[in-house]
Image: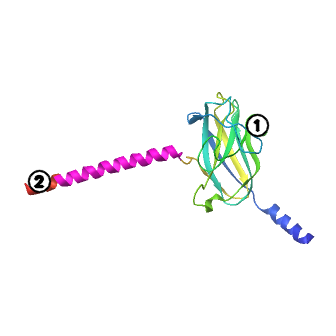
Amino acid sequence: MKQILFALLLVLQMTPVKAAEILGQTQGEWKWQRPEENGAAPPVALSATATSTWRKGIAFNVSTPGLYDIISTATPGWNNFTILYDGATIGGLSNAMMANDDLESSYTSGFKGVYLKDKAMFNSNQYYLLVTTGRTNNDFGSYSLKVTGPGVVKFYPFGVPEPSTWVLLILGVGIIGAGLRRRSSSKGADELTMQLG
């Protein structure tokens, strides 16, 4: 039995750890009232000090379930804050898994040893979303985001549009389609009139 456990431990130690890193910028994106940190539990309140702070969301998924480290490092001069969402929609408190201010210093935030599952096998809610924002309204700037764990991490840097964006996109395409259909049907009627006349 000890030999089997030793062999298993050896295999686990030899399993390569994969890492993915991406650079981002919070300023110029969206402003919001960010959630408050609540230890390892999901946030339950919105911040009283960060009521209109810049934020940037990055969607990602992992190929292998396991424990992952997610570290956001701000460029010197601003204090970053990180929120992990289960799903691709930023909704204040809804879907928020956890939030963190200072991990290793005031310029790093994130999570160590977070269990993530392979969300690519599901049809809906296929992504995690990591939001980097400021600790206060005056905190914003550039950052690097690094995710390390047992699986391949795939970032979707353009994010996944929020529901309101999808609604506007669908309405816009519908209006254009209706206009083109109306235009082509009136054009057909004009051609028929010309042929008859």
Residue of label 1? 102
Is 188 magenta? The answer is: yes
Q: Nearer the viewer, mark 2 or mark 1?
A: 2
Helix, strand or loop under label 2 = helix
Query: Which of 157/169 is in front?
Result: 169
Q: Earlier in the sequence, mark 2 or mark 1?
A: 1
Using the rendered view, name the quadrant where residue 192 is placed: bottom left
The boundaries of the magenta stretch are 161-189
Q: Position of residue 17 (x, y in %)?
A: 75, 57
Q: Quadrant of residue 78?
A: top right
**Image quadrant for the N terminus?**
bottom right
Q: Residue furthest right?
A: 2
Viewer-proximal residue, 141 or 178? 178
Tell me, yes or no, whether the highlighted magenta stretch contains residue 91. Answer: no
Q: Amino acid at mark 1?
A: Asp
Q: Marks 1 and 2: in contact by CB < 8 Å?
A: no
- Left or right of 147? Residue 54 is left
Indicate the secondary structure of the residue bearing disc 1: loop
**Position of residue 192 in the picture relative to residue 72 (left or right):** left
